[in-house]
Amino acid sequence: MVDILLCGCGGKMGRVVAGLAAGRDDVRILAGIDVAQDKSQPFPVYATAAAFTGKADVIIDFSHPSGLAGLLEYAVSTRTPAVICTTGLTDAQIALIKRTAERIPVFFSANMSLGVNLLRALAVRAAQVLGGAYDIEILEEHHNQKVDAPSGTALMLADAIHSVLPQTHYVYDRSQKREKRDGHEIGISAIRGGTIVGEHTVIFAGHSEVLRLSHSAQSKELFAAGALRAAVFLHRQKPGLYDMNDLI
Ligand SMILES: NC(=O)c1ccc[n+]([C@@H]2O[C@H](COP(=O)([O-])OP(=O)(O)OC[C@H]3O[C@@H](n4cnc5c(N)ncnc54)[C@H](O)[C@@H]3O)[C@@H](O)[C@H]2O)c1
């Protein structure tokens, strides 16, 4: 049994993780952390990790970037491996995650879905074959409650393509300049509306042909299932930084 401390337990993702965990016998939500107090959960909820005095095997975090530093400090001081799923992090916060992973096991992925991580691998392959000759654009669509844009997943896809095409640079907005795109751009566009769970398309537009690689998330459950899978994997690992590639 893997005991989990669930940060952001009162949020949309936190509730899906808790619901999924309740139906499994290999994981258990020992306690939750959430700045919004909620007595309806079947486990104790604390406002901060520091207020929790028990011992969990793994932390799963689906909360907000503002809580990251405190959560990682707690994880290091209690030697608790952490699965960080929160997105919208700054470069400094990502650097902090990497430094923390030198001391404890940390799993970090902007997208916990297996399919999206396969999409990333396919996009890298397409960039290696087509890059330079084809214009690359990434389109992401999410529900109207999402606060960060572009999505962490869109940036993850862009970064993966950039790793094999280092001459590329990102363009988020074409409204301020009246000039043609250059061949090294990766255009990144965000759409927000309704209850769209998450759509990501990587477009390779060439002369007379267009290749589109798309992933469609149909429910939040796939992210929750990925996070629980990561937690079970992580609690037996050595310190280091892990991601979905370690699970595929
Ligand atoms: N990696 C992935 O695959 C993946 C998938 C879905 C969502 N996400 C990310 O997970 C995060 C949460 O998503 P959501 O849809 O559940 O959001 P949400 O707004 O519904 O829930 C966030 C919860 O975190 C709580 N919270 C806010 N600040 C906190 C803090 N400092 N400490 C503790 N709790 C705090 C809020 O009270 C809320 O209950 C977002 O960053 C989202 O982009 C990642």
Image (spheres, rainbow, N blue to C red):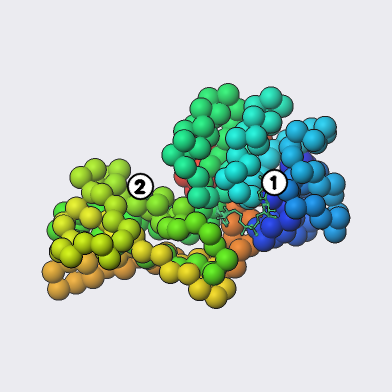
- Residue at 58% x, 24% y: name it: 103
Quadrant of residue 57 within the rendered picture: top right
Is residue 245 shown to the viewer in this render?
A: yes
Looking at the image, is mark 2 or mark 1 earlier in the sequence? 1
Give left or right: position of 20 versus 139.
right
Q: Amino acid at mark 2?
A: Asp
Q: Position of residue 115 (x, y in %)?
A: 48, 59
- Residue at 59% x, 60% y: name it: 222
Q: Amino acid at mark 1?
A: Cys
Q: Is residue 134 above or below residue 53?
A: below
Classify mark 1: residues with Cα within 10 Å, few (<14), some (14-19) or many (20+): many
Q: Position of residue 169 (x, y in %)?
A: 25, 49
Instruction: Identify the element where label 2 is drawn.
Output: helix
The answer to whether the beta carbon of the residue marked 1 is less than 8 Å from any atom of ligand 1 is: yes
Instruction: Identify the element where label 1 is drawn.
Output: strand
Q: Which residue is mark 1?
A: 7
The residue sitting at the front extreme is 176
Classify mark 2: residues with Cα within 10 Å, few (<14), some (14-19) or many (20+): some
Q: Which residue is mark 2?
A: 159
The answer to whether the beta carbon of the residue marked 2 is less than 8 Å from any atom of ligand 1 is: no
